[in-house]
Amino acid sequence: MKRTDFSYDLSPERIAQEPRERGRSRMMVVTPRDGAAVLEHTSFASFPEQLDRDDVLVINDTRVIPARLYAEPKGAMKSRIEFLLTRQLDAMTWESWCKPARRVREGDCVRFSPALEAKVLEKRGDGTVVIRFRGDAAEIERVGVPPLPPYIVRDAPRESDRESYQTVYAASRGAIAAPTAGLHFTNEILDRVAARGVGIIRITLHVGIGTFKPVKVDDIAEHRMDAERYEITPAAAAALNAALDGRRAIAAVGTTCVRTLESAIREGKGRFEAGTRETSIFITPGFEFRAVDRLLTNFHLPESTLLMLVSAFAGMETMRQAYAAAIRERYFFYSYGDCMFIRNRGTW
């Protein structure tokens, strides 16, 4: 299957630059049926009523860290050096993307503030460097900025993005990107979901570089996902297994929940086991879903691993029809954009 099978054209004006009002974004309800899409256009305010009373709703409670930091210029440089923290190795050591990477060398010290600097321990080929912070680790929270994706254009970082780019239920620090399907929720909507008798289960996947690393190969079978860490607590595992035993539909909020659940059920050979593990699962059309029955998700970039995942879930033709309708109906796309709720799995 080719990367270009997941291409589409989108006007830049449909890329959301500002967060939707929580609970008020537009929502497309997609029901795959006989290889096609039955579509309904509504508001996310109606999401609780889209769930059946026996469903369980799975949310990812990861919290985004301010993972983009700027070091002071070195030598004759005029511009700051940008570091995007991508993977934590220990309390003070991180893999990171560096720009411009050519201006740093192994052994260099870079300074982020009077209270925080880092030493470059290792330099790799793809712009990745390993750095070890020295100073007050809490200073990372103060001087770092939210790692908004590059298609959200800012003249300067905004303090408001620190909360806009978090879900209302974010708790466990460690993500470098938000699980954006969760940005639509308010506490009031979660209360309405619970009031319907729908169980809400928290899991954690710390979104890393694997989620949004671009696919550069023509044959998608050759793409390799970077590993991301996830955790399922004993209580969450018990609730998920009870849902399996009771044949209750599992509705995932976002692709991160899908990847976690489908990885975990394979690790447990058909059951969910508590624990902390890593996943590098790559879900493409033809994948056999064993855990997730329904999916809330945003509209994703063309040729991305996320679009491949939702195409595997709903069916490629269903997604082609849904995305064409979203463009025609002027939905907003990507992280701060509108959403779709896929009511059941389709065929690809």
Image: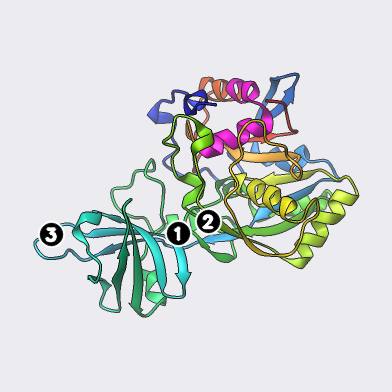
* Earlier-in-chain disc, 2 versus 3: 3
Residue span colored magenta: 305-321
Q: Main secondary structure of the magenta part?
A: helix
State the residue position of label 3: 77
Q: Residue furthest left?
A: 76
Instruction: Look at the picture and state if 199 lies above or below 338.
Output: below
Instruction: Look at the picture and state if 15 lies above or below 109.
Output: above
Determine whether label 1 and label 2 are within 8 Å by CB: yes
Secondary structure at numbered mark 3 = loop
Whether residue 293 appears in this view of the structure is yes
* Earlier-in-chain disc, 3 versus 1: 3
Nearer the camera: disc 2 or disc 3: 3
Q: Calculate the distance from the C-alpha at mark 3 to the C-alpha at mark 1.
A: 29 Å
Is the residue marked by circle 3 packed among few (<14), some (14-19), or many (20+) residues within 10 Å? Answer: few
Number of numbered discs: 3
x then y, percent, for residue 267: 72, 55
Is the residue marked by circle 2 packed among few (<14), some (14-19), or many (20+) residues within 10 Å? Answer: many
State the residue position of label 2: 166
> Which is more toward the observer, 151 or 17?
151
State the residue position of label 1: 162
* Residue 343: mark: none
